[in-house]
Amino acid sequence: MSGLSQLIIYEDADLLVINKPAGLVCHPTKGDIYSSLISRIRLHVGPEIHPQLINRLDRETSGVTLVAKNPEAALALRRNWESGEVHKLYLAIVHGHVASDGVIDAPLGRDEESIVAIKDKVRSDGAPSLTRYRVLSCFERQEGPFSLLQIELLTGRKHQIRIHLAHIGHSIVGDKLYGLDEDMYLDFVKRRLTPEQNGKLILPHQALHAASLMFQSRTFRAPPEPWFTAFVPASIVLP
């Protein structure tokens, strides 16, 4: 058993669409056969099929993930991706009340001052990066003020949504790298987060969810996980 069946949104001879859970890496690190999404996919499709991930989400990001089940499907999907024909929408819960809808235009590149090798930042000589966001709701909890946003990626840089939202002063709730303190990320990867740190993070994972992908006149949607939806007041209807 691959443990994948409950995550499948759609499947045919060419394509597999998964609602990836937060906390699961796309590719193996150290661990058992179930330690990555691609490992579970290989168990699901069997040894005669060689699946390829078309898009990859951060470990802590949940949502729609496309998998090609043969080289022809992979080539066609990657052409769609590279030509800008794929429309991606995300949901994010961020700190603070975001005043209005907007577009973040801020180039991104490596953060050479950080001790975290994978960390990027806004920098003038970086790659052009555009993120459009829409405010779905602002709400209060005992932990403070928050906003629920719908995000559209207009470019596809590494960690783009997370960096851009932190750049405008509204970091994603639970983001261990671009949120309160990058030491949170170091302690997270070394599995030594303290109860106090977890309390500051508020949520067990970063509240970023790949909600839908649209291409070739097809749309695939995935609902957020219960920990995400439970944080939002019941009166707010998620799209």
Image (cartoon, rainbow, N blue to C red):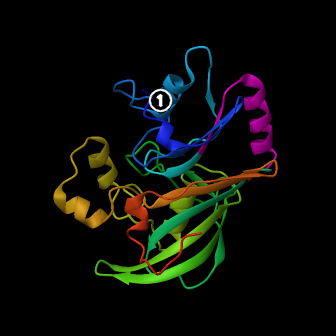
Residue 38 position within the rendered picture, expressed as x and y whole percent measured from the top left: 51, 30
Vertical order, 88 against 8 (above or below): below
The residue that mark 1 highlights is: 40
> Residue placed at 75% from the left, 37% from the top?
77
> Residue placed at 42% from the left, 41% from the top?
24
Residue 125 position within the rendered picture, expressed as x and y whole percent measured from the top left: 64, 55
Residue 190 position within the rendered picture, expressed as x and y whole percent measured from the top left: 26, 41
* Closer to the camera in the image, 15 or 199: 15
> Residue 69's image quarter?
top right
> Residue 144's image quarter?
bottom left
Tell me which secondary structure the magenta stretch mostly adopts.
helix
> Circle 1 sits in a helix, a strand or a loop, which is it?
helix
Looking at the rendered structure, the kind of residue marked 1 is Arg
Q: Alpha-carbon neighbours of circle 1 within 10 Å: few (<14), some, or many (≥20)?
A: some
* Residue 22 visible to the viewer: yes
Query: In this rendering, would 80 be left or right of 16?
Result: right
Image quarter of the C terminus: bottom right
> Residue placed at 49% from the left, 31% from the top?
27
Q: What stretch is highlighted in magenta?
A: 65-84
Vertical order, 40 against 148 (above or below): above
Vertical order, 13 against 64 (above or below): above
